[in-house]
Structure formats: C-alpha cells, structure tokens
C-alpha cells in the first residue's frame, strides 16, 4: 500500500491524489475530504494536499462539528417499545 505522503515524495510536491484516480468519493466527513482533495485552483490543479487536510480539520473542525451543549446529559426512558417487522 502506498500512502498519499509517499506519492508526494516519489512524484514531487505538486503530486495530488486526484492525479492518480478518476473518481474519489466519500460520505459525511469523507465527502468533505474528497471535495477538498479534488477542488481545483486557478490552474485547474487540486487546491489542497493531503497534508493540508490535517491542518484544516484542526483549525476548522470545532466550527464544523460543534460539541453538543448537553453532551454529558443522561437520557432516561421508562417505556421503550421496539417493534421488529420481519418479511414473511
């Protein structure tokens, strides 16, 4: 397995993951990552490197994924009714 960082060492600092794959995709935070890896700059080259993603998440993660105000709250329920429907 070759890591993205290894590709930049082999092919130079301008190497981007989008240079190696026709399609990159993800869901949730993966969609954000793949969008950043594929977003073009003014020269139609990928705007961000894989190393940029760590910095982006450290700086912007708390704004994108704010902590819940009551994250330590305990939710209690006295009546729980689970209904399972099985195909016949």
Image: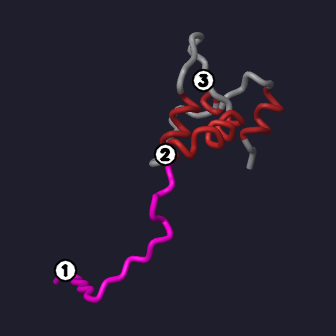
Q: Nearer the viewer, residue 14 or 51?
A: 51
Residue 81, percent across and down?
Answer: 23, 86
> Which residue in the rendered view is the most extreme toward the top?
43
N-terminal-most mark, 1 or 2: 2
Residue 25, percent across and down?
Answer: 49, 41
Task: Quarter of the image for the C terminus: give it.
Answer: bottom left
> Which residue in the rendered view is the most extreme toward the left?
88
Q: Residue 53: within the magenta?
A: no
Circle number at residue 87: 1
Point 65% across, 43% down: residue = 58
Magenta-colored segment: predominant secondary structure: loop
Q: Mark 2 packing: few (<14 Cα in 10 Å), some, or many (20+)? A: few
Q: Residue 76: within the magenta?
A: yes
Point 45% across, 64% down: residue = 70
> Which residue in the rendered view is the most extreme toward the right?
9
N-terminal-most mark, 2 or 3: 2
Range covered by the magenta-colored residues? 64-88
Q: Mark 3 packing: few (<14 Cα in 10 Å), some, or many (20+)? A: many
Q: Nearer the viewer, residue 22 or 77?
A: 77
Q: Which residue is mark 3?
A: 46
Contact (Cβ within 8 Å) of mark 2 with mark 3 = no
Point 55% across, 40% down: residue = 33
Q: Nearer the viewer, mark 1 or mark 2?
A: 2
Circle number at residue 26: 2
């Amino acid at each position: 397995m070759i890591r993205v960082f290894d590709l930049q060492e082999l092919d130079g600092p301008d190497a981007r993951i989008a240079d190696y794959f026709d399609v990159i995709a993800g869901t949730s935070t993966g969609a954000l990552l793949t969008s950043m890896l594929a977003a073009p700059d003014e020269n139609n080259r990928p705007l961000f490197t894989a190393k940029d993603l760590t910095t982006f998440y450290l700086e912007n993660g708390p704004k994108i994924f704010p902590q819940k105000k009551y994250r330590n709250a305990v939710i209690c329920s006295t009546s729980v009714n689970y209904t399972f429907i099985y195909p016949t």
